[in-house]
Image (cartoon, grey):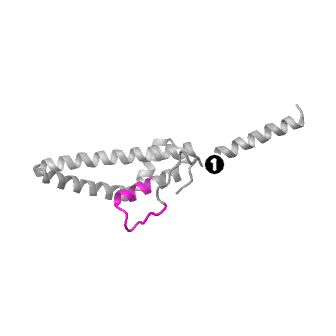
């Protein structure tokens, strides 16, 4: 094999390695360029926290599910405040349409569980997104 051919192979390998480590802007998304934590709702804070921690922890060798669990743990306060706010709003909405307090509580609890499940799925999505796109931490 000629030196020129070996040089071409090395150049192609080097290009391939560098292109794999660069962020793919078609996959990565950062929606928080003008985020104001004092004005943001708990829902917005939870979403931002989940994205930041999922991107931050995505380089771990743990499974995506375990990294998503760790992400949820890192964001537990924002998640719980978001869930509490949704719970309270759902309860009020149910009472306003004539539900009994017990019915309103059940509906609010269902809504709470749905929101927790949604946020967990968002954490898992963000971990996989970060891994696939080699995303930078926002």
Whether residue 34 is in magenta: the answer is yes
Residue to which mark 1 is pinned? 22
Can I make out residue 72 in this image?
A: yes
Which residue extends farthest right?
Answer: 2
25 or 14, which is in the foreground?
A: 25
Q: Which residues are magenta?
A: 33-50
Residue sitting at x 74%, y 40%: 13
**Residue 119 rendering spot, x and y as whole percentages:** 37, 48
Quadrant in the rendering for residue 40:
bottom left
Q: Quadrant of the N terminus?
A: top right
Element type at mark 1: loop
Residue sitting at x 42%, y 66%: 36
Left or right: residue 105 compared with residue 42: left
Left or right: residue 15 compared with residue 69: right
**Residue 38 rendering spot, x and y as whole percentages:** 38, 68
50 or 67, which is in the foreground?
A: 50
Left or right: residue 90 compared with residue 6: left
Residue sitting at x 41%, y 46%: 122
């Amino acid at each position: 094999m000629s030196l020129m051919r070996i040089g071409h192979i090395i150049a192609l390998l080097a290009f391939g390695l560098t292109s794999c480590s660069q962020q793919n802007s078609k996959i990565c998304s950062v929606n928080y360029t003008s985020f104001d934590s004092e004005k943001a709702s708990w829902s917005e804070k939870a979403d931002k926290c989940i994205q930041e921690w999922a991107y931050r922890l995505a380089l771990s060798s743990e499974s995506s599910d375990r990294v998503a669990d760790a992400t949820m743990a890192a964001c537990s306060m924002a998640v719980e405040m978001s869930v509490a706010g949704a719970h309270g709003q759902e309860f009020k909405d149910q009472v306003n349409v004539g539900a009994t307090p017990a019915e309103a509580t059940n509906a609010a609890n269902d809504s709470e569980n749905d929101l927790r499940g949604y946020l967990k799925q968002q954490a898992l999505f963000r971990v996989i997104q970060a891994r696939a796109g080699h995303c930078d931490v926002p």
